[in-house]
Amino acid sequence: VNAQGEEMLDLDQALDALEGFDVKKARAVELRYFLGCTAEETADILQVSKATIDRELRFTRSWLIQRLNPGAAAPPSV
């Protein structure tokens, strides 16, 4: 498995872990980043507000960065 393949496996494992404690956040990532839905479309599908999706994706992005790069500093809040 090459480096890119290992990174994809790591991401898949991290998303599985995320789904284990918060299915809605995992679905938001899948809809937004893998299926290309807009934030508004993601909010409609998950039946939450766009503000909720924005907050959940900010949290999830930080969580994934920390999970995939344990020694990395947390990204600045937006």
Image (cartoon, helix red, strand yellow):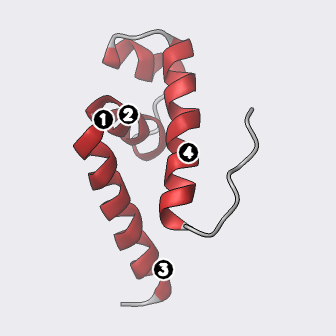
Asked if the residue under mark 1 is in contact with the one under mark 2, i.e. CB atoms within 8 Å, the reply is yes
Q: Position of residue 78 (x, y in %)?
A: 75, 32
* Residue carrying label 3: 4
Which amino acid, by three-letter code, is at mark 2?
Lys
Q: Amino acid at mark 4?
A: Arg
**Residue at 49%, 22% in the rendered image:** 53
The residue located at (47%, 9%) in the rendering is 49
Q: How far across and down, in percent of the image, does residue 61 sit?
A: 55, 45
| Residue 38 showing in the rendered view | no
Q: Which mark is residue 54?
A: none
Tell me: residue 15, above or below residue 58: below
Q: Is residue 58 left or right of residue 8?
A: right
Say which of marks 2 and 3 sits in front.
Answer: 2
Give the distance between the C-alpha atoms of the residues marked 1 and 4, in whole angstroms.
14 Å
Identify the mark nearer the N-term, 1 or 3.
Answer: 3
Task: Report the residue marked by disc 2.
Answer: 25
Q: Earlier in the sequence, mark 2 or mark 3?
A: 3
Disc on the earlier residue, 1 or 4: 1
Q: Quadrant of residue 46?
A: top left
Front residue of 45/56: it is: 56
> Percent position (x, y) of residue 76?
76, 43
Pointer 1: what residue?
A: 22
Q: Which residue is mark 4?
A: 61
Quarter placement of the N terminus? bottom left
Q: Residues within 10 Å of mark 2 (few under 14, many from 20)?
A: many
Label 2: which secondary element: helix
Give amino acid for label 1: Asp
Q: Residue at x 62, y 70 (%)?
A: 71
State the CA–CA distance, disc 4 to disc 2.
10 Å
